[in-house]
Every structure is written in C-alpha cells, then in structure tokens.
Amino acid sequence: MSYARFSDADVYVYESVYGFFMCQVCLLTPQDEGGWHGDTTTNTRMEMVTHLRAHREAGHDTGAAIDRLEAEIAQGEPEPREPCRACYEHDRPVELRRFNGAVFCRSCFDKAVAMTPQRGPQAPGWADGEVLP
C-alpha cells in the first residue's frame, strides 16, 4: 500500500513486503551518474514521518503521507516484521527466527538445513535461532 505517489505528491512512499518503509527515488538523496536519486528506507512509521518532515522542510509536497502514517501510529498499527529470507512471508502468524543475520520461518529453515552440506551435530537447529517478536 502506498502512502503517497508521484501522481499527487513529490514523493513515492510505501510499506514494503520486506518489512520496512520506502521513499523511492528520494529527492533528498544524491543523484547517480544517470541523474536518478536513490531510495531511503526506514524501519518504523515514525522514522518515515521524520524523513517526510525533512522533505517538507525542503519544499517538497508529501501529499497525505504524514497524516496517514500518524493515523496508523495513533491507532497502534503494528510495525512490519522482517520477513522470512526464503519465502518473504511476514504477515501470517508464523514464528520467525534469526540465524547468522538471516531470518527464516520453520518451513524454509528445514528446507535450507536439508540442502546444506553441514548436517549432523554441528548443523544449526531450530532451537539455536533467535526468536523474533
């Protein structure tokens, strides 16, 4: 779902399925050799509101994005969860665990372990992962 689009604002802001908020082709980032601006990502709605306020201070039209994000914050909308690295699910009520920086659901973890040559007692088990909220 987008909070603002270029058709009605100077920013394109949305919640990514990968568990963060994106300000795509952000005018506050430097331009590359081709003249394109980079993207800005935040982990929370409040961080994106702060980012969008910087856009407003720079004279950019942010549309209704700040109001929509602040309304979700006021309603207690949960922040997005980092998704499983393999299937990118994060909205369903599934337990996620982190292993060496990578996040997995149980099903994908079992598949990944079955495909690794490091089987046996030294292979990580589901219980070895950090439980994510």
Image (tube, rainbow, N blue to C red):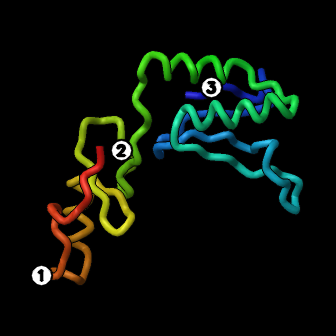
Q: Secondary structure at mark 3?
A: strand
Q: Secondary structure at mark 2?
A: loop
- Left or right: 47 in relation to 107: right
**Residue at screen point 35% across, 36% down:** 91
- Left or right: 12 in relation to 17: right
Instruction: Name the residue tied to disc 1.
Output: 120
Q: Could you give the CA–CA distance between mark 3 and mark 1, rounded to whole angstroms?
A: 48 Å
Q: Nearer the viewer, residue 102 or 108?
A: 102
Q: Report x, y in % for residue 72.
A: 50, 20
**Crowding at mark 3 (Cα within 10 Å: few <14, some 14-19, many 20+):** many
Q: Sequence order check: which comes first, mark 3 or mark 2?
A: 3
Q: Identity of the amino acid at label 3?
A: Tyr
**Residue at screen point 74% across, 20% down:** 63
**Residue at screen point 80% across, 28% down:** 56
Instruction: Name the residue tied to disc 2.
Output: 89
**Residue at screen point 48% across, 17% down:** 74
Q: Quadrant of the C terminus?
A: top left
Q: Identity of the amino acid at label 1?
A: Gly
Instruction: Name the residue tied to disc 3.
Output: 3
Q: Quadrant of residue 116?
A: bottom left
Circles 3, 2 touching at the beta carbon (< 8 Å)? no
**Crowding at mark 1 (Cα within 10 Å: few <14, some 14-19, many 20+):** few
Q: Could you give the CA–CA distance between mark 3 and mark 2, rounded to whole angstroms?
A: 21 Å
**Crowding at mark 2 (Cα within 10 Å: few <14, some 14-19, many 20+):** some
Q: Could you give the CA–CA distance between mark 1 and mark 2, rounded to whole angstroms?
A: 28 Å
Q: Is residue 109 above or below residue 77?
A: below
Q: Report x, y in % for residue 89.
A: 35, 44
Q: Sequence order check: which comes first, mark 1 or mark 2?
A: 2
